[in-house]
Amino acid sequence: MAAPIPALELTGLSKSFGTAVAVDQLSLTVPTGSFYGLVGPNGAGKTTTLSMATGLLRPDAGSARVHGVDVWTDPVAAKRMIGNLADGVRLFDRLTGEQLIRYTGMLFGLPRDELATRTADLLRLMDLEAAAGAPVADYSAGMTKKVALACALVHAPRLLVLDEPFESVDPVSAANIEDVLRGYTGSGGTVIVSSHSMDLVQRMCDHVAIISAGRVLIAGTVDEVRGEATLQERFLELVGGRIHSEGPQWLRQS
Ligand SMILES: Nc1ncnc2c1ncn2[C@@H]1O[C@H](COP(=O)(O)OP(=O)(O)OP(=O)(O)O)[C@@H](O)[C@H]1O
């Protein structure tokens, strides 16, 4: 029997900025229906990888396929299947939260009635109903993150690519979002999420890849990767870089 087509398949992805290699022949297979965590130290290449995987940044080499569709040769078909919460991408923040979600849904050609229902559902889910009529420019960091996440969900994509989705999000909203994402993967959707929270990845994800210096150090199910240790311990063991110190002398207060 032929192997099932993965939700996301990255093959030999590479990207340099000048002489600095950000992503170095990175390959990764994200199975359909998985909740996949991408972790790594600052500057490891997570955002660069996800930007190339979602059609935002052209790779120097390699390919990205979403459910078998090449992101760079057939971008329209691929992007229809992707919901993307990207790091550092500007939103049309003169729009209100409600307008921004509706506008995003319109770009995907959703019918007006359906869009009204989805927008209302998403505003409720993200606890943004009270702020729905305010311009996104006036939102807090966490509210901005939540409205961007709502935009990523509105067209019910088959693959969700979320760069640090819980950063700045309050615990109640995070728990609500977590429930929705679990329901989504339970129904066959796929999530790939980058995070610095090992606890969150260990709790939520069934697969994880640890990347460092633009390469995959290890990838597999969370249980395979962590073995007998916690994910945090495994991460520190593989990535290194701990400085066992109480800080410089000049900082000490006594
Ligand atoms: N537009 C750019 N121009 C120059 N260098 C860049 C650019 N984008 C990323 N880099 C470099 O590429 C490397 C990988 O960056 P990237 O943002 O992908 O890391 P990251 O794993 O997402 O880090 P963090 O956890 O800090 O968000 C870093 O060395 C960074 O300085």
Image (tube, rainbow, N blue to C red):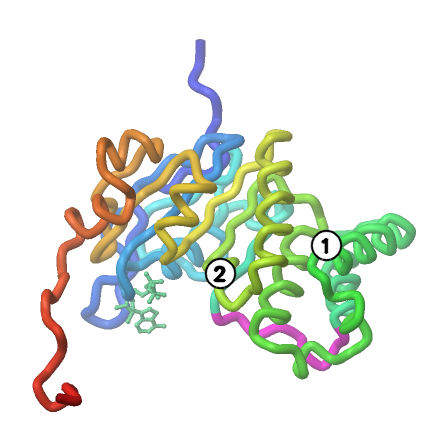
Binning the other alpha carbons within 10 Å of mark 2 as few (below 14), some (14 to 19) or many (20 upward) gives: some
- Asked if residue 173 is among those painted magenta in the image, a careful observer would answer no
Ligand 1, what quadrant? bottom left
Question: What secondary structure is marked by label 1?
Answer: helix
Question: What secondary structure is marked by label 2?
Answer: loop
Residue 187 or 176: which is nearer the viewer?
176
Residue 179: percent from left, percent from top: 62, 43
Number of marks present in the image shown: 2
The amino acid beneath tag 1 is Leu
Q: CA distance from mark 2 to mark 1?
A: 27 Å
Q: Disc number at residue 51? A: none
Is 175 displayed left or right of 46 in the figure? Answer: right
Q: Disc number at residue 56? A: 2
Location of residue 49 (image quadrant) = bottom left
Position of 127 relative to 131 (above/below):
above
- Asked if residue 90 is among those painted magenta in the image, a careful observer would answer yes
Q: Residue furthest top?
A: 1
Instruction: Tell me the magenta residue range.
Output: 88-96
- Residue 11 visible (yes or no): no
- Dot 2 or dot 1, earlier in sequence: 2
- Residue 103 visible (yes or no): yes
Location of residue 100 (image quadrant) = bottom right
Q: Which residue is mark 1?
A: 125
Question: Main SS type for the magenta part?
Answer: loop
Residue 16: percent from left, percent from top: 26, 64
Q: Residue at x 75, y 77 (%)?
A: 95
